[in-house]
Image (cartoon, helix red, strand yellow):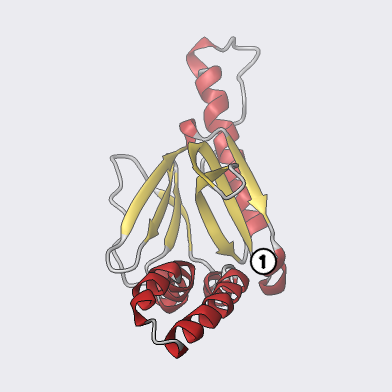
């Protein structure tokens, strides 16, 4: 899969049910194209002022514009590091949790336990349609805020080729796990054995 990192550390009785990786083309394209329009417009506007400042000999403004070009540097950094980030990205689903490995220089590992997942969603954006991929989003109460002040879940599997299949499997596992938590086997009457729990994926 193009990944040479370590398998996640598993707890006693924990097994990996599924593992996967983002599609390389879609992953890199998303990081190269998502901010490109903003970065391009920003660069064109700033270049006009930079050229005017250079023409008038006002070189003292150049440090300001170097800082003002931050959206361009962010886009450039995302594009340049995308291949390395793809190599370090790996997704796992165990019988207890979701594991996301990602990073640039170091590999960070994040866990989302099924019991904490409020909702599982699948998202297929414009770039996903172009590359035949999709994102699986795990709503566990952890959010970041976008420019429109909307809560965006932090944890997700990005740019998966088999996103719909993985989504269906994970959604079933989350439902099974949470149903067992609400209706534990020990409290079920014999004539009602309860939900058909199956963690085999």
Quarter holding the N terminus?
bottom left
Residue displayed at 52% across by 82% down: 47
User: Does 56 appear above or below 164?
Assistant: below
* Residue 108 placement (x, y as % from top left): 32, 56
In the image, 178 versus 77, the foreground residue is 77
Residue displayed at 36% across by 82% down: 59
- Seen as rendered, the residue at the extreme bottom is 55
In the image, 14 versus 23, the foreground residue is 23
* Residue 40 placement (x, y as % from top left): 58, 77
Under circle 1, the secondary element is helix
* Residue 198 placement (x, y as % from top left): 55, 38
Q: How many marks?
A: 1
Residue underneath mark 1: 128
In the image, 54 versus 65, the foreground residue is 54
User: Does 92 appear above or below 70?
Assistant: above
Q: Which image quadrant for residue 120?
A: top right
In the image, 174 versus 153, the foreground residue is 153
Residue displayed at 64% across by 15% down: 192
Residue displayed at 50% across by 22% down: 181
* Residue 145 placement (x, y as % from top left): 52, 44
Image position of 99 (left or right of 172): left
Q: Which image quadrant for residue 162?
A: bottom right
Image position of 59 (left or right of 189): left
| Disc 1: CA contacts within 10 A as few (<14), some (14-19) or many (>=20) | many
* Residue 1 appears in the rendering: no
């Amino acid at each position: 899969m193009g990944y040479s990192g370590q398998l996640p550390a598993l707890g006693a009785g924990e097994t990996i049910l599924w593992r996967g990786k983002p599609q390389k083309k879609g992953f890199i394209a998303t990081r190269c194209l998502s901010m490109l329009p903003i970065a391009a417009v920003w660069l064109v506007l700033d270049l006009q002022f930079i050229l005017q400042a250079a023409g008038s000999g006002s070189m003292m403004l150049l440090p300001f514009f170097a800082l003002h070009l931050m959206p361009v540097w962010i886009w450039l950094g995302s594009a340049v590091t995308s291949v390395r980030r793809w190599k370090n990205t790996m997704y796992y689903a165990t019988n207890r949790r979701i594991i996301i490995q990602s990073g640039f220089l170091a590999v960070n590992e994040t866990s989302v336990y099924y019991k904490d997942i409020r909702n599982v969603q699948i998202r297929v954006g414009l770039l996903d349609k172009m590359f035949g991929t999709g994102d699986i989003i795990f709503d566990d109460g952890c959010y970041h805020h976008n420019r429109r002040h909307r809560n965006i879940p932090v944890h997700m599997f990005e740019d998966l080729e088999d996103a719909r299949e993985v989504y269906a499997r994970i959604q079933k596992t989350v439902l099974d796990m949470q149903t067992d938590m609400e209706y534990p086997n020990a409290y079920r009457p014999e004539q009602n054995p309860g939900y058909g729990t199956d963690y085999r994926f």
